[in-house]
Amino acid sequence: MTIPETDRSLPLRERKKLRNRRALAEAALRLFTAKGFEGTTLEELADAADVSKSTFSRIFPAKEAAGIEAEAELWTAFLAALDERELSGVLFGELHRALADAVTGLDADWDQRFIDTRRMVANEPALLRYVEHYRAGVKDELAQHLAAKLALDADDLRLRTLVELTILAWSVSGRHWVYNGGRGGRKALLSRLDGAIEAIPASLGMTAPG
């Protein structure tokens, strides 16, 4: 589950950092949608969130990162959920359950933020490239997580293929959900994810007539 910036169990400094992160992400989504990514300066972004440029740089590595925060929240939660799991049985099923747990634990307002983010990214080549770069990093980190848990090499082709299939299942289900405006809520998204996971082994066994 994502940690709200109002959580009093966190030190004041951490709560403030989380508030600033959320404010910057919301400002980025709003300004990039209204003015375009290239048309929004870092100064405008920082001003809209009422923070300094140096504060921005301490929170996000690049302007693009603020624009895809909803995407980053998902994969951060997924990696955390996987870390907490004691893996047993079929690994594809374990990854499926960890991803479903991550989605379930996201903030209630994540749905609309993710939908808005993906629609924005589709119209901004720079952000689309950044998402692809970010997901490549997630794939590497996921392979390393699995390798450490299973005492395997992170470049093991079985692990790499498993990682790619997991991300693919999410892409197929998430794209459909966003295209339909999030109809059916998170329950529909998770159901579509279940279907995509189940379709992968079934699709590998498909044959053509003749």
Image (tube, rainbow, N blue to C red):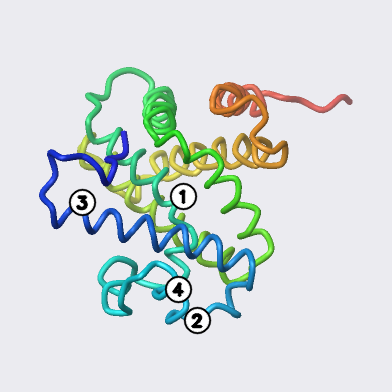
Indicate which disc residue 122 carries: none
**Which sits in the foreground, 70 or 50?**
50
Q: CA distance from mark 3 to mark 4?
A: 20 Å
Query: What residue sits right under mark 1 in the picture?
Result: 70
Q: Residue 150, percent across and down?
A: 23, 34
Q: Is 161 rendered above or below residue 108? A: below
Q: Residues within 10 Å of mark 1 (few under 14, many from 20)?
A: many
**Image spot of residue 111 (x, y percent):** 53, 38
Q: Secondary structure at mark 3?
A: helix
Assess whether mark 4 and mark 2 are in contact (beta carbons under 8 angstroms): yes
Above or below: residue 38 compared with residue 159: below
Q: Which residue is mark 3?
A: 15
- Of 181 and 210, nearer the camera is 181
Q: In the image, 108: left or right of 184?
A: left
Furthest residue to the right?
210
Question: Which residue, given by chain and number where applicable, does mark 4 sit on?
Answer: 45
The amino acid sitting under disc 2 is Thr
| Rendered image: mark on residue 41 | 2
At numbered mark 2, what does the secondary structure look like: helix, strand or loop? loop
Q: Are marks 2 and 1 in contact (CB under 8 Å)?
A: no
Kindly report which numbered mark, 3 or 1, lies closer to the viewer in this rendering. Answer: 3
Please name the residue shown 26% across and 24% down the image: 87
Dot 4 or dot 1, earlier in sequence:
4
Residue name at image x 48 percent, y 58 percent = 68
Considering only order in the chain, which callout, 2 or 3, is on the residue closer to the N terminus? 3
